[in-house]
Image (cartoon, rainbow, N blue to C red):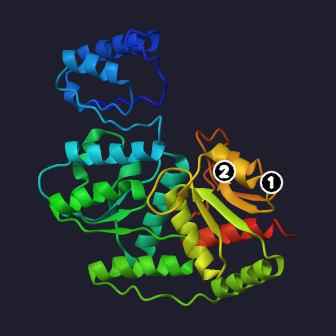
Amino acid sequence: MLSFFLQPFHCPPDPLGDCSAQLADTLVHVLRGHKHRSKFRFQKFPDQLILAVRIQFPDVFTVPAGLNTDFYAGQTAFLLAMSRHFCGDGNGAHRDYQLLGGAPSLQARRSHDALSALLKDRLGLACGFDSLNATSVEDWAHANDAEISIVTAQSAVPTARHLQEKYGIPYCFACGLGRCAEEKFLEQVAAHFGLDGSARQDGTYAFVLMQMKNILAVNRPAIVCYADVDRLLALSAVFEELETEVEMICSHENERYMHLLPDDFITRYAPRDVVVISYDRVCRAFPRAVEVDQMGLDFRLQTPLYRPDFGVQGAYLLFEQLSELFF
């Protein structure tokens, strides 16, 4: 079986435009030479091209992701489509848990790996299916083979609900930033398996948290966070620990936070004296900023060195970056 992805692009409105015609010829050529046509999946292409391909190959299904408008909406549509089309029959529950969600990036995959390591170390649980490490459609056949789904991004909530309704797999949300968020998450997962998830004493974190509170109290910065809904939820957890009010603006449409496009955000906040926590490209427009994510492709050197961007370790990293702005 073969997976086929098309990245977002803008084609001419004319159904006979060069972009659509060339792409249609390419797709038809590939499909004619592949015996598992029904296992192709398309993330984004023009309506005219969808019609042209499906007339010739009615067993091909498409995912109307709308990536040009909202990439987050595309992730949501893609995950749900994969779970609906490729999950096996019945829930064997042969694995402890599975991870659902996250953008297909090296950073997100490393976060999943770190989360799995945390659950193995603290609760002795093993991960089965991981949506970010799925390399073929066959991997999705195991997305109904766990006792519980752990949702690492809001884009995976519809998928988790579908698996719960169809296969009876409950779900919970992964932890945000900070010790409170990490311990609450571990307690919730432990309770599902009847394990001891009691919080561990951590005097070091308490001391570091106190230092960060003092730094913020002295400098009294106006902090604005601009990111996707998952990053904002994680940041809200740690700023609650810090007892610090921050402004949250979302980079895509959602039901929880105010939404602004990147250029609109920069136009509104660049004249103000604020500390911005955001994407790399947005941070370049502000003299005091902390980069916590990338916008688009990351072309920087990728090394095996990694610090988790969630829980206690993620909070330490954020505290270090924030404190450097004031000294």
Vertical placement of residue 9 versus 216, above or below: above
Residue 145 is at least partly visible in this image: no
Q: Which residue is mark 2?
A: 265
For the point 20% across and 48% down, the residue is: 87
Q: Quadrant of residue 205?
A: bottom right
Count the labels in the image: 2
Q: Position of residue 169 (x, y in %)?
A: 22, 65
Residue 178 is at least partly visible in this image: yes
Picture quarter with the N terminus: top left
> What secondary structure is marked by label 2?
helix
User: From the viewer's perspective, is 203 left or right of 32?
Assistant: right
Q: Position of residue 253 (x, y in %)?
A: 48, 51
For the point 82% across and 76% down, the residue is: 219
Kind of residue indicated by mark 2: Phe
For the point 28% across and 44% down, the residue is: 82
Q: Residue furthest left?
A: 89
Q: Which residue is mark 1?
A: 271
Separation (CA) of disc 1 from disc 2: 11 Å
State the mark number for residue 117: none
Picture quarter with the C terminus: bottom right
Disc nearer the start of the sequence (1/2): 2
Kind of residue indicated by mark 1: Pro
User: From the viewer's perspective, is 15 left or right of 292?
Assistant: left
Q: Position of residue 319 (x, y in %)?
A: 70, 71
Q: Quadrant of residue 96?
A: bottom left
User: From the viewer's perspective, is 320 left or right of 93?
Assistant: right
User: From the viewer's perspective, is 227 left or right of 22?
Assistant: right
Q: Position of residue 212 (x, y in %)?
A: 73, 79
Q: Quadrant of residue 315?
A: bottom right
Crowding around mark 1 (Cα neighbors within 10 Å: few <14, some 14 to 19, many 20+) is few
